Each structure stands twice: as C-alpha cells, then as structure tokens.
Image (cartoon, rainbow, N blue to C red):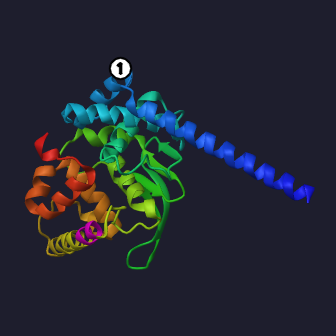
Amino acid sequence: MIFVYIVLGGCAVLAVWALVRRSAFRRRRLRLLGQALPAAWDAILRDNVPIYQRLPEDSRAKLGGYVNAFLAEKNFEACGGLDEVTEEMAVTVAGQACLLLLNDRCGLFERLRTVILYPDIFSAEGGIDHDGYERGREERLGESWETGSVVLSWHHVLHGPETEQDGHNVVLHEFAHQLDQRDGVADGAPVLGSLAARRRWAEVFRGAFERHRSRRHRGQRLVIDDYGGSNPAEFFAVATETFFERPKKLSQRYPELYEELKVFYALDPVTW
C-alpha cells in the first residue's frame, strides 16, 4: 500500500509540474506574440519578402509577433551541404510561413518541430501518386512531413518571393500542407470552425478543383498552377500560393474559392 501511495504521489507531482510548465510556455508565447519584431529581422523581411511591405500596418505588426514566437519555438537544421542556418535564413522562412497564421485560429504549427534547409533542390523518395503508382526518387523544392518537419530549398525560399505574381512560393506551399495536416489527414480541408463552414468549404473546393482539372485537361490557360490538379491536398497548397501571389486573377477566375480563402486566412490580398 505504501508503494501505491508513493506512485500516486509521484504521478501527482509530475502532473503539477506538467501544468506549471505548460502555463509558463503559454505565458512565454503570449509575451513573444505581443512584442515588436526586432529591427534587424524587420530589415531582413523588407529585403527578402516583398509581400511583407504591402501588408496593412496592423497585419505586419501581428506577423512580427508570430515570427518572434516561431523562431523561439522551432528548430532549424542545415542539410545537404549547407554549412549552417543563418539568422537571415530562419527569419525569411518564418516571415513567409507565419502569413498563414494571421487569422489567429491556427495556433503556431503545433505539430511542427524542425525546419530542414537544403542549399538548393534536393532528392527524395517519390512515394505513391494519386493514381496509386509508386514513384522513384524525385527532385524537390520542399516537403511537409506529418511527423513534425518541413524541408525546404533555401535557394527557392529566397528567390521564390522575388518574382511576384507567378503563383510560386515554396514556403507558403509547404506550410499550407502543415495546416492541412493539423487533423492528421492531408485532404485539402484544414481545420474549420463549424459544420456549416466545413460543408461550404467542401462544396466550393470540390467545384474549383474539378474546374481546374477540366481546364488543365483541355489545355486552357491556368491561374492556379498545373500541379494543383494532382489531388485535393496539393490543390489547397497551390491555391494558397495563388491567393497570396496572384490574388486579383484568382478572385476573377474563382471568386467563391477566393472568398473561402479570404475568410480562412482573414486577409484580403487584392486590397494590398
């Protein structure tokens, strides 16, 4: 019986310790979210992420808080011949990734633990495609793993934002996958608030996805990149890139899709 009491007492101590630690973690995050972005980091984002300067002032300030918290909580690793992950690299990744969090409903990519940076395009196993065929090794710009990692090519992280309105941004793409994977399933449907919102999302995205695939099949000019027709998960990721990089064209071609993304991200890039 004494042993049982000792075990129960130990469990109680561990539970209290976990609660205290969790509370301290929340307080620290809230403090970082409320802090202004350091001047050096602000300068990096102004140089490397053109969209940062076009953000409304309140959104830019909020983004700075998310960048503070992201850099405090996530690990960065250099890989594939990259000597180290510099401050510039980490801030440039965080500044783009955290654009997707400004709706204040998506946490801070809670499943994510590590961002892995390669110097350029890297080789990875292809896996199984949407038709059920196994692919060989492929050259990649980025990957999002459900196990808590995002892998990126630094060359494309840095140079992707330079060509605005081309619809390509590897950071936005891979971190959109992270939002999609929050519920453990990469299906093109991020976590939404209500049943009505989920039904509306499913209806709009299904229609837009089929319309995109039809236009691709007929060889028509596309607003959303061809790769978005691969499967619903890729469609959501590519649509997110398009939403931020080609908002006017997306709103004209797919107005209902644009509205869904505008509501979800709580941003309206057309007005910037």
The image quadrant that residue 210 belongs to is: bottom left
Determine the residue positioned at 38% across, 79% down.
131
SS majority, magenta:
helix
Closer to the camera in the image, 52 or 13: 13
* Residue 259 in the image, given as x and y percentages of width and height: 16, 58
> On the image, numbered disc 1 is attached to which residue?
39
Residue at 68 percent across and 42 percent down: it is: 17
Q: Secondary structure at mark 1?
A: helix
Q: Farthest residue toward the right? A: 2
Q: Residues within 10 Å of mark 1 (few under 14, many from 20)?
A: few
Give residue 215's quadrant in the image.
bottom left
Which residues make up the magenta segment? Answer: 196-201
111 to 155, vertically: above or below? below
Q: For the image shown, how many numbered marks are present on the structure?
A: 1
Q: Is residue 200 magenta?
A: yes
Q: Where residue 104 appears, x then y in whole percent?
A: 34, 46
- Residue 140 position by quadrant: bottom left
Q: Amino acid at mark 1?
A: Ala
Q: Position of residue 230 (x, y in %)?
A: 31, 70
Pick the residue in front: 231 or 202.
Answer: 202
Q: Nearer the viewer, residue 255 or 224?
A: 255
